[in-house]
Image (tube, grey):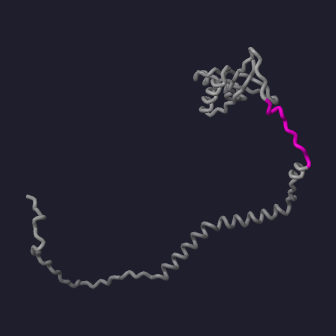
């Protein structure tokens, strides 16, 4: 049955604690007392800090002194640099090209813009065929075209044609999601 300690009064008598007496040991054992020795601790901390600082900064210091010596040797042998651009700019007149800011001509009736997206270009025809097959499986209309650039034959994988720019941009987004450098191209037909 559990005891109810709440009903006990505070004035209840307690048993006196039994007193223990000291019994001497038969074999005398000397106990060493631990004494903090401040000078030893301080000198150890200072030596440790010095080792850490030297290990951390000495390689950089030595490398910087070597680089400073190299910089001095290079500066002795290097010709002085002269900036001519400010003088040339003051003495010349810059002509702007107004055609780059002109409004494009309106399209003639029956003429429309065809959009294509270049997915990638390869030197190897097999790589181009492989990418074309992957794009066809993703429902993207892909074609191959080959051209000779600076004496080398390049094979381009082109997606399209699209009559709306929005469709071409969607195809371009799908290609960029696959980490392909998609380039939007416009053709007039």
Q: Is residue 32 above or below residue 85?
A: below
Asked if residue 6 lies left or right of residue 172, the reply is left
Residue positioned most to the top: 110
Asked if residue 74 lies left or right of residue 5, the reply is right
Q: Residue at x 69, y 23 (%)?
A: 115
Q: Is residue 96 above or below residue 11?
A: above
* Count of numbered labels shown in the rendering: 0
Of 103 and 79, which appears nearest the observer? Answer: 103
Q: Quadrant of residue 110?
A: top right
Q: Quadrant of residue 64?
A: bottom right
Asked if residue 79 lies left or right of residue 131, the reply is right
Asked if residue 16 lies left or right of residue 150, the reply is left
Q: Quadrant of residue 142?
A: top right
Q: Residue at x 80, y 33 (%)?
A: 100
Of 8 and 60, which appears nearest the observer? Answer: 8
Which quadrant does the C terminus fall into? Answer: top right
Q: Is residue 100 magenta?
A: yes
Which quadrant does the N terminus fall into? Answer: bottom left
x, y percentage for residue 177? 59, 32
Q: Residue at x 87, y 42 (%)?
A: 94
Residue bounds of the magenta highlight: 91-102
Q: Is residue 93 above or below residue 54?
A: above
């Amino acid at each position: 049955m559990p005891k109810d300690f709440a009903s006990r009064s505070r004035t209840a008598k307690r048993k006196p604690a039994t007193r223990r007496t000291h019994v001497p040991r038969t074999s005398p054992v000397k106990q060493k007392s631990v004494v903090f020795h401040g000078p030893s601790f301080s000198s150890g901390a200072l030596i440790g800090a010095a080792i850490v600082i030297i290990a951390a900064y000495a390689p950089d210091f030595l490398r910087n002194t070597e680089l400073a010596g190299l910089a001095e040797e290079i500066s002795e042998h290097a010709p002085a640099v002269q900036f001519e651009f400010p003088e040339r700019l003051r003495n010349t007149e810059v002509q702007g090209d107004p055609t780059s800011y002109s409004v494009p001509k309106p399209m003639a009736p029956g003429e429309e813009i065809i959009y294509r997206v270049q997915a990638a270009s390869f030197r190897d025809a097999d790589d181009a065929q492989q990418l074309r097959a992957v794009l066809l499986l993703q429902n993207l209309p892909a074609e191959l075209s080959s051209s000779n650039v600076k004496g080398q034959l390049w094979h381009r994988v082109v997606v399209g044609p699209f009559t709306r720019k929005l469709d071409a941009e969607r195809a371009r987004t799908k290609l960029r999601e696959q980490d392909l450098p998609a380039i939007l191209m416009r053709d007039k037909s």
